Amino acid sequence: MLELSMMLAKLKLNQWKSEDEFKQIQEQKFKQLFSYAKEYSPYYRKTLKDCTFSNLEDLPNLPLTMKKSLQSAPDDFLSSKFTKKSLIKSSSSGSTGVPVDIYHDRSEAHFGPGFELHQFTEAGVNPFDSQIRITHNDYKQNFIQKLGIFRRKHLPFSNSPQKNLQIIKHGPQKVLIGFTSVLVPLARANLETRAKAKIIFTSGEVLSESDRKLISESFSCPVRDMYGCVETSWIAWECEEGSMHLFSDYLIAEIVDDDYRPTKGSGNIVITPLWKRSMPLIRYFLTDQTAIAKRCKCGRGSTVIKPVIGRDDDFIVLKNGSKLSPAVISCALNDVNVKEYQIVQNAIDDFVFKYVPAKGLDLVNLKKIFKDQIGDANIEFEELDKISCTRTGKRKKIITRI
Ligand SMILES: [Zn+2]
């Protein structure tokens, strides 16, 4: 709790620092991370063996860390200062259908909630607002919420929007949180129910201007987007001027072109979380596309990025016309131990669910979760040794043939 309060105080204070001051913080933190990773992480001991770092100009000369390296040997990344048994595992949804196992130590557990609390409090959320997150059933409360502060109720996205809206409508105005693709059908259904919210936070997928307008108008409240991923935690948050500010005091973001060279234009984002020690990540390449934007007029000195694109994978189209995103399905399947999967939609009510089992696969639950998401449809489950790639090397999670 103390660490979290201190982190929050630092975020509040640091956000008004100048660009140069942020660079100084980054350089100093990166130096420490660089020597730490070289010494304690087997992966970086190998890949950074002949590399040196004296200032941020040297950063583009260091090798990128690709997702496939992390997927194939996550243990190689773990710091020898921690025992694997003591670490907490979380799996990313993985935009290519292969989840990535990420570990963190209890001493690092406050970072994710700290980033989230910063964006919530900057948007005017107070500790006793009633929060509702639309997610899968087994979502765990973080340690702050267990203490009764910033408490959050979870509603399953397998509920019909109407059912969730009745709960949202009851009592004081809520703070709503969820994937964009979950909030859009909810907002559509709410055009009849007319529940109001205090503020809505979207994440997980691209938020188009039309979706933002729909959600905002339906619930008569502002909408703020958040950007992050399981591997690096939260990356950017939206200020009152609508700019996506990076957490520049806790991470370094770079933009690289298709040849992995630094670019001032649009490209793929590369993230180095400066706070991770149990599983350091240096220059982690994400498939999300963005560009560095101009400084924000709100006065905060942290780097601003343009709206992130390239996250919109294929969606499943349901009978009622709503779309189901890969992020929603991955999130629901988090605990069933499936190694890889791919969903082929042949018709509006005809699916093939291909999967590669991991140790301890809970097939009964997997089938139940998927059926709950899809509703009344013909589903064939097919067990495979591996999911084949497309010609471009992508392993898509959803293939639609309708
Ligand atoms: Zn701003």
Image (cartoon, rainbow, N blue to C red):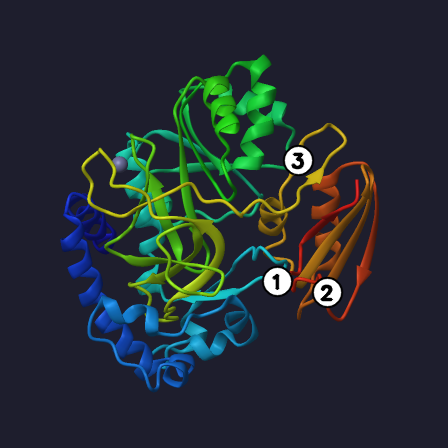
Q: Residue at x 60, y 28 (%)?
A: 185
Q: Are marks 3 and 2 in contact (CB under 8 Å)?
A: no
Residue at numbered disc 3: 323
Circle 1 packing at 10 Å, graded few (<14), some (14-19), many (20+), is many
Circle 3 packing at 10 Å, graded few (<14), some (14-19), many (20+), is some
Q: Is residue 199 visible?
A: yes
Q: Is residue 207 left or right of residue 158?
A: left
Q: Toward which corner of the image does residue 275 lie, by quadrant?
A: bottom left
Q: Earlier in the sequence, mark 3 or mark 1?
A: 1
Residue at numbered disc 2: 387
**Viewer-side residue, 401 vs 60:** 60
Q: Amino acid at mark 3?
A: Lys
Q: Give the Cα separation between the discs numbered 1 and 2.
A: 9 Å
Give the percent coordinates (x, y) of residue 142. Answer: 40, 49
**Viewer-side residue, 51 vs 207:** 51
Q: Residue at x 36, y 69 (%)?
A: 282
Q: Is residue 170 visible?
A: no
Q: Earlier in the sequence, mark 1 or mark 2?
A: 1
**Which corner quadrant holds the C terminus?**
top right
Q: Are marks 1 and 2 in contact (CB under 8 Å)?
A: yes
Q: Is residue 168 left or right of residue 283?
A: right
**Viewer-side residue, 38 vs 335:** 38
Give the percent coordinates (x, y) of residue 340. Answer: 67, 62
Q: Toward which corner of the image does residue 135 lie, by quadrant?
A: top right
Residue at numbered disc 1: 98
Q: Is residue 361 left or right of residue 197?
A: right
Q: Earlier in the sequence, mark 3 or mark 2?
A: 3
Q: Residue at x 77, y 31 (%)?
A: 319
Q: Residue at x 48, y 52 (%)?
A: 288
Give the percent coordinates (x, y) of residue 150. Answer: 34, 38
